[in-house]
Image (tube, rainbow, N blue to C red):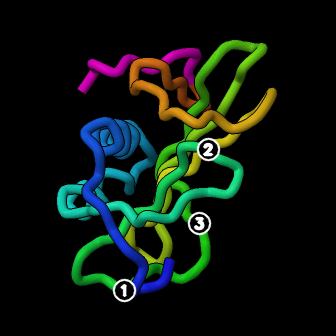
């Protein structure tokens, strides 16, 4: 994302989903909660029409290309399985990527209660 790219406030759903993913992600994921609290989203939209979005953190330069996954989840059923991960690059919270596993990438973000982690059959959204 270019430093001069337009930004918009995160929606309530985007913020809640990203927070849950960081709270339940890998060992260092919680370290990014303070960045999330001040994050905005870029106005960038993926060409495929998926619900992926990029963060813009005030006072920090746009991160260099690269993905360091902080939390990785799946959602959906066998016929409509999808994945989602929150990631950083060079210490800056960078985005949320949504992708399709058994079809096109979803155009709508999942609810945290729909997410399953890699080593558990189902995560509970209320187990904070």
Residue at 36% x, 44% y is 18
Q: Earlier in the sequence, mark 3 or mark 2?
A: 2
| Image quarter (top left, top right, bottom left or bottom right) of the C terminus | top left
Above or below, 49 relative to 89: above
- Distance from label 2 to label 1 (Cα)? 25 Å
**Magenta segment, which residues?**
120-128
- Camera-side residue: 47 or 2? 47
User: As displayed, is residue 65 above or below residue 107?
Assistant: below
First-in-chain label (2 vs 1): 2
Dot label at residue 61: 1
Is 39 covered by the magenta stretch? no
Residue 35 shown left or right of residue 51 in the figure: left
Q: Residue at x 19, y 63 (%)?
A: 38
Depth order, front residue of 102/41: 41
Q: Which residue is mark 2?
A: 50
Residue 16 screen position, x and y as percent: 28, 37
Q: Indicate which disc, 1 or 3, sits on the residue closer to the N terminus.
A: 1
Q: Residue 25 bears which disc, if any?
A: none
């Amino acid at each position: 994302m270019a430093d001069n790219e337009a930004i918009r406030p995160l929606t309530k759903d985007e913020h809640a989903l990203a927070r849950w993913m960081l709270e339940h992600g890998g060992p260092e994921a919680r370290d990014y909660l303070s960045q999330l609290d001040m994050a905005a989203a870029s106005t960038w939209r993926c060409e495929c029409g998926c619900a992926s979005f990029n963060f813009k953190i005030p006072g920090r330069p746009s991160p260099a290309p690269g993905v360091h996954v902080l939390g990785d989840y799946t959602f959906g059923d066998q016929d409509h399985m999808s994945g989602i991960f929150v990631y950083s690059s060079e210490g800056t919270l960078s985005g949320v990527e949504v992708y399709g596993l058994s079809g096109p990438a979803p155009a709508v973000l999942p609810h945290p209660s729909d997410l399953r982690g890699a080593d558990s059959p189902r995560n509970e959204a209320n187990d904070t």
